[in-house]
Image (cartoon, helix red, strand yellow):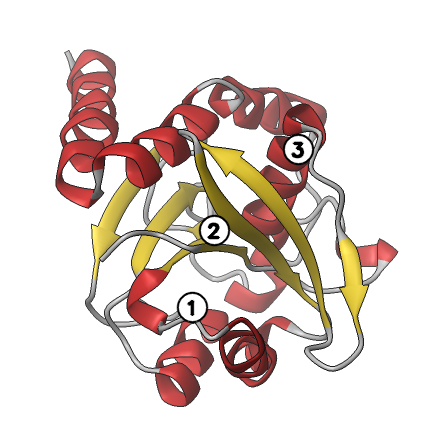
Amino acid sequence: MPIKLIVGLGNSGERYVRTRHNAGANMLYAYARNAGALFRYDKFCRANLAKASISSREVWLCTLDGFMNESGINLAAVLKFLKVDIGSCAVCYDDINIALGRMKLTLGGSAGGHNGVRDVLARCGDGFARLRIGVGGRADKRQDLADYVLSVMTAEQTAQMHSLDGAFPEALELLVGKGLAAAQNVVNRRDDAAEQKAEG
């Protein structure tokens, strides 16, 4: 099913902007700025919406207002408003199980402990593409997970995230233009190769 809507998950508010949990929304905002796509707030959906041309196709970009763990509420409203099926969506979000500065493109599966994805699954259903942005795991496993993902990244960690500045737009172009399987073939193979190089 062609991608018609790309959603970046995150918490609203200035205090959350530079946290790990806002990686999805932040990457989408950066993409929109570079593409010249302007977000406008829709009070019915409680979401920021923008139109963008990706691979010569018109696609909606979206970030949701409110808290991460209620992402499904507003996304359900967006889907209804735009008349888009969840299967035509790509959801971008942070993943602690992926190394910082890497990405994985997947379809289906569990929420993996991510409260935003859990709420989307509960309220909107499954079948959406997932662009999982690595933020790395906790150095100290005793640290509360919520505290970790809501903590601000260091300057060095932020710089590592910027290594995706080229890969993220390419992933969206491939996903929209050539479909999930073709995009996975590039995005996930690159990530696997980077992992093997790091281990070798």
Identify the residue at horizontal 37%, vertical 71% (top origin): 113
Q: Amino acid at mark 3?
A: Ala
Q: Are marks 2 and 1 in contact (CB under 8 Å)?
A: yes
- Front residue of 88/190: it is 88
Q: Amino acid at mark 2?
A: Asp
Q: How many marks?
A: 3
Where residue 157 appears, as percent x and y from the top left, is 59, 28
Where residue 8 appears, as percent x and y from the top left, is 55, 54
Q: Earlier in the sequence, mark 2 or mark 1?
A: 2
Which element type, helix, strand or loop, lies under badge 3? helix
Quick one: label 3, few (<14), some, or many (20+) residues within 10 Å?
A: some
Q: Earlier in the sequence, mark 3 or mark 2?
A: 3
Quadrant where the N terminus sits is bottom left
Between the C-alphas of marks 3 and 2, the distance is 15 Å
Identify the residue at horizontal 35%, vertical 80% (top origin): 121
The mark lying in front, picked from 1 and 3, is 3
On screen, residue 91 above or below 117: above
Q: Which residue is mark 2?
A: 94
Q: Are marks 1 and 3 in contact (CB under 8 Å)?
A: no
Which element type, helix, strand or loop, lies under badge 2? strand
Q: Are marks 3 and 2 in contact (CB under 8 Å)?
A: no
Left or right of 137 in this view: 160:
right
Q: Which residue is mark 3?
A: 30
- Front residue of 56/24: it is 56
Q: Is residue 60 visible?
A: yes
On screen, residue 118 above or below 182: below
Quarter holding residue 199: top left
Identify the residue at horizontal 67%, vertical 50% (top origin): 50
Q: Earlier in the sequence, mark 1 or mark 3?
A: 3
Left or right of 103 in this view: 93:
right
- Mark number, residue 114: 1
- Mark number, residue 100: none
